[in-house]
Each structure stands twice: as C-alpha cells, then as structure tokens.
Image (cartoon, rainbow, N blue to C red):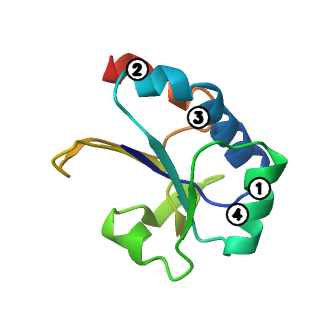
Amino acid sequence: MLLYFYPAAMTPGCTTEACDFRDNLARLASLGYEVLGVSKDPIGKLCTFHERDHLSFPLLSDPDLTVHKRYGAYGEKKLYGKVHVGVIRSTFAIGADGLIELAKYNVRAKGHVESLLKTLA
C-alpha cells in the first residue's frame, strides 16, 4: 500500500499530486500497490475533491492529525524561508506485513509519483 499525506484538498499542488496518483494507478498496481490519500480536511471536502477530479482511490480524513503525527507527517517545515508547523507532504510504502518499506518526506507534488515508480520498480 502507498499511504500519502497532503496538506489540503483542491489546492493546486495537492490536485496535481492526486491526479498523478490517479493517472498511474495501473502502473502502481502492477507493482503490488494500492493508494490511500490522507489529509486533515473534513469528509465533505474530500468527497467533493474525489468527485471533482475523478479520483479512483480512497481519501481519508484525519482532522485531529493523529495519524499524521504518528507517521511524522505533521511538524516543523520551511515555507518561503520561514519555519512553521503544518502538514509535511509525505509518502509511505507499506508491505503486506504492515512494515514500512519506504518513507519519503518533504516531497514535491509534481513528479513525485514518477520518482516513486522508479524507486519501487
């Protein structure tokens, strides 16, 4: 499974990333991976995002950031040279045994899936 954390549904970067995962689901499945997206957005917003962009994988809501924090996907990060606290765009490859095989933090929205495909192949 690929579990990816993103800052906010329907923003330009998060839309780019989600559509990239959507467009590469068959390639990821051929490597044995399903995709789950996680954000702090409420379920209603995730439903709108899912429908608007024809996403064909589940989006999970973690409004209290419990899951984000357990994966280290929430904390200090730099944005435009300033340090602040927020969601850290991250992706985890999790094996059938439940162990994390790969952890990527501070990934860029554009080109991230292609990079993952190269790493996981």
Packing grade of label 1 (10 A; few <14, some 14-19, many >=20) is some
Give the residue number, with chain letter if any, for mark 1: 49
Q: Secondary structure at mark 2?
A: helix
Please state if 49 lies on the left or on the right of 81 as rendered. Answer: right
Cβ atoms under marks 1 and 3 closer than 8 Å = no
Q: Label 3 is placed on what type of residue?
A: Phe
Camera-nearest residue between 40 and 44: 44
The amino acid pointed to by label 2 is: Ser
Q: CA distance from mark 1 to mark 4?
A: 5 Å
Indicate the quadrant containing the C terminus: top left, top right, bottom left or bottom right.
top left
Residue 92: x and y, percent? 35, 46
Up/down of 57 relative to 67, above or below: above
Q: Which one is earlier in the sequence, the residue at label 2 or at label 4? A: 2
How crowded pointer 3 is (Cα within 10 Å; few <14, some 14-19, many 20+) is rated as many
Q: Earlier in the sequence, mark 3 or mark 2?
A: 3
Q: Which residue is mark 2?
A: 30
